[in-house]
Amino acid sequence: MTTLTYVSVRKTFGPTVALEGLDLDVKQGELISLLGPSGCGKTTALRIAAGFEFATSGAVLVDNADITRTPAHKRNMGMVFQSYSLFPNLTVANNIDFGLRTRKITAVERHRRVAEMLELVELTHLADRYPHQISGGQAQRVALARALAPRPSVLLLDEPLSALDAKVRTTLRDEIRRIQTELGITTLFVTHDQEEALAISDRIGVMSNGRLEQLGDPREVYRHPSSAFVARFVGSMNQLPAVVNGNHAVTVGPHPVVVPHTTMADGTQVRLLVRPEDLHLTDEGLDGSVTSCTFQGSSTVLGVRLDVVDVLVAVHVAGVADLNPGERVCVGIDGARAVLESTDTTPDTASGTASDAVPATSPA
Ligand code: ATP
């Protein structure tokens, strides 16, 4: 059984605060993704667990034992980086064996473990190849096997899929999850790719400016973001100008929308953040013109410019919607999971504008 715990971990680099009091508990066999924009502190958090950096204050525990000051080589952590960092002069098998050489393991046992790892990552047939003779996806599997061979208590993955092309990334992502579940290894996974985090994790920790903004089950984080930052960063969001009208309502133009409880005063100008799947075509709602119609297999994404607020929104429609640019539609808003953001506090340049939810290329 292994747990990894951060207790109020703070890390500064000179004047830069990389982590501002991180509290996190990765449970036995759990995979937690740390997700956030560049510079939010996720790699620093991982490196502190690995022992490559030391916390300025706070503590790191493994199975409740304090390892805050334990040197990296005594931590028994497996680490995979974005760059495969394989030894070019060693074969695939010898790369995997490398981490075992420094341990007190017999040659027979080492041989057995290398074979076991090759099988686990399905690369037995490439055991004698050198790194330059294998693909990027295969190289990253070797890196994973090498990290797992010494049977680490915790697996730390730092953007392991970022250097791979889209298709390989998806396959390897699922592969990592299969192996992690099969071994039941406690894992921390760092990524800036929200789709990756949603697909692979037991829980996601969304970070911003060295802080954990929200920690939760992927569905919970997606469906009930705790802040406008999380709402924008995880999944796409439409943004509509609105005005608060009571504790549970806003108006978008003349159209009333029921929203979660707000304490903002009546008349406050806000941005209503609402997912494309929470907009629908209806008979009564906001009139607009179709700008694009993108068939995505199980659903269609419509780009619609709403007349009254002059905003382009994305509307997810189940199945096939055969609409042409210029066609008139009426859009309804389900505000039950919407997030309100006061327009006074956030600039218009915030990431994830309304049009981000609309596909860039949109054959009609
Ligand atoms: P990215 O996705 O770009 O890797 P990140 O979320 O992993 O970003 P970190 O690498 O943890 O972010 O960096 C957090 C902050 O700490 C950044 O402002 C970064 O510039 C700073 N930082 C990280 N390492 C160092 C260092 N060795 N010296 C000085 N500042 C550092």
Image: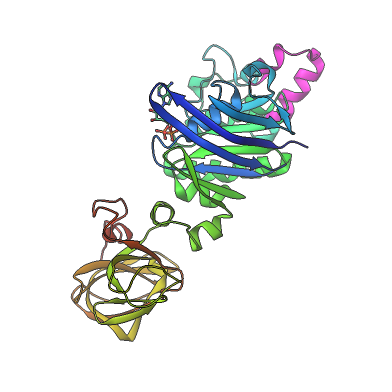
Query: In the rendering, at what x and y percent does residue 108 appear?
Result: 81, 16
Residue sitting at x 38%, y 24%:
15
Horizontal relation, residue 141 to residue 15: left or right: right
Q: Is residue 139 above or below residue 176?
A: above
Horizontal relation, residue 325 to residue 110: left or right: left
Q: Nearer the viewer, residue 132 or 316?
A: 316
Residue 14 visible in image = yes
Q: Is residue 124 above or below residue 200?
A: above
Query: In the rendering, at what x and y percent does residue 35 appear?
Result: 48, 43
What's drawn in magenta, residue-wise?
Answer: 96-117
Horizontal relation, residue 172 to residue 17: left or right: right
Q: Nearer the viewer, residue 21 or 350?
A: 21
Query: In the rendering, at what x and y percent does residue 98 appear?
Result: 65, 15
Q: Nearer the viewer, residue 152 or 59?
A: 59
| Residue 107 falls inside the magenta stretch | yes
Q: Quick check: which quadrant has ligand 1?
A: top left
- Seen as rendered, the residue at the extreme front is 265
The quadrant of the image that shows the N terminus is top right
- Residue 362 picture quarter: bottom left
Query: In the rendering, at what x and y percent does residue 354 appear?
Result: 28, 61
- Residue 339 picture quarter: bottom left
The figure's colour scheme reads rainbow
The quadrant of the image that shows the C terminus is bottom left
